Image (tube, rainbow, N blue to C red):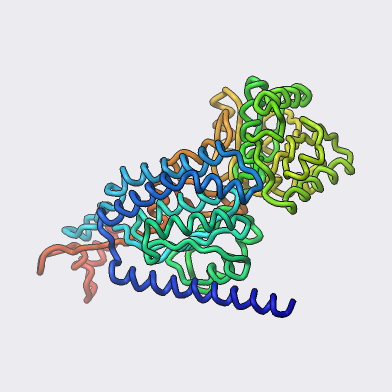
Amino acid sequence: MIESQTEHDALESTAVAHMSQVFEAQQEAFSLEPFPTLDVRLDRLVRLRKMVEQGSEIIVAAVSQDFGHRSPDESRIAEIAGTITAIDYAIARVRRWMRPSRRQATIWFLPASNQVIAQPLSVVGIMAPWNYPVNLALVPLVSALAAGNRVMIKMSELSPATGQALANLAKQFFDVNELAVLGGEAKESAHFSSLPFGHLLFTGSSRVGRMVMSAAAQNLTPVTLELGGKCPAIVDGDYELDEAAKRILWGKTFNAAQTCVAPDYVMVPKGQTAAFVEAMTRHYHANFPQGALSDQYTSIVDERGHSRLTGLVDAAKRAGAEVRVCEPTTPEHNRRRKFPLTFVLNPNRDSALMQEEIFGPVLPVLEHDGLDDALRLVKQGEHPLALYYFGHSSNQRESVLKKSLSGGVAFNDVMLQFLQVDMAFGGVGASGFGRYHGKEGFETFSHLKSVFTQRGMGRFTGLKLLYPPYGRLGRLVTSLMGG
């Protein structure tokens, strides 16, 4: 046992040292090419596209291995198609993003000119989670490469097969000084977050996010945190309940709801709970004729996660909430960590189920007495990463936007805001901060440098009126400037 522990510590030490070596090598490579040309950036993005396209089946198989079972179709949608869409979008627009942005010079400083240039930061660190291990590693990578950086990716310890698959693929298409994909457990993650990156992006839980931010603060490393939270879905009285149930069901069963923007709980008009649950259950059986044991239904990632969901439901039941399941749980469900969709009706607001992000196919259903009543409940908790509202009234939608604060909003659907490559994605408050995707991602991984240029030797500028010694004319100019 002692020898085994010693070997384990030696491996950890080697992995930590390797991280530092890769970081130093990437920094040195960046110093030799601190402002990559458009052609260099396009070449890297094209190689990334080929890597994902040619490695797609390897990736799908590796993700499923890490989950125990992950629907291949879900992996192709989320991990492959979603990533390639982001790459193609960047390839088509990176030339435009790289152009200096001209800014106005005020009259007092003419004939000067102003511009802002987007400068690469150096080496970017990306800490990917286990729930969408490819998309949430590679979509930020797209932004970082488009911005001209070198990149290190730390994969989650819960997705070792996917991490190894991506590491092998990266070595085929990139030099390690351009892109390195690394594995490891908690010690390696802690060391990774302590490296002095130009920027560090972390996706995961708020608990770990706080530790990452604390480690990064030692180097004053700028951080983007994508954390999640309890994303509510509000169904208003003028929206078709059956259609709302169908759409919310998709969000609550895709990847077995192990998604940071999955609808966490739903609020329906008073007296509509039974009809809503019946509609959800009917659509559940239509989508999954074999129930949760279907190959289209994803497993909970590990035993700890499965037990946690069971514990949340059992605790709510003990506290008096009514629990309904779409199908009975069998030993085979438990063996394969397949968790059937489960409804918890009107749970206690102080229960763990209503305080913690659920991250699984358990859906609390509450009733509201109008939109203001629903928004009051939302505001009692921390700001969610996403808010979903089902309703046809433009006035009510405007009210949702003005009376709630969330990372993003989707009207009449769920989760699709994440897949919009031309919109920034990120949280607010406890659901994280910082943005990526599209142009905002490019800017996140760039230094937006302000450049002031005074034109002409010896030319007159209004500012010269403010040179000392200060006299009446200077004071008049200062007054005109508002001073």
- Corner quadrant of residue 360: top right
Residue 234: image location, x then y, percent? 66, 32
- Give the quarter of the figure containing the C terminus: bottom left
Give the vertical position of 104 relative to 153 (above or below). Answer: above
- Give the quarter of the figure containing the N terminus: bottom right
Residue 330: image location, x then y, percent? 81, 37
Give the vertical position of 261 relative to 392 (above or below). Answer: below
Q: Is residue 405 visible?
A: no
Q: Is residue 199 visible?
A: yes
Residue 257: image location, x then y, percent? 65, 41
Which residue is pictured at 51% across the width and 38% down the height?
A: 77
Q: Is residue 239 left or right of residue 368?
A: left
Q: As rendered, which of 480 and 268 lies closer to the eye?
A: 268
In this figure, what is the number of numbered marks? 0
Q: As rendered, which of 58 and 163 lies closer to the eye?
A: 58
Q: As rendered, which of 11 and 309 lies closer to the eye?
A: 11
Residue 385: image location, x then y, percent? 59, 46
Give the vertical position of 383 relative to 271 (above or below). Answer: below
Q: As rendered, which of 450 and 130 lies closer to the eye?
A: 130
Which residue is pictured at 42% across the width and 56% down the height?
A: 444
- Corner quadrant of residue 398: top right
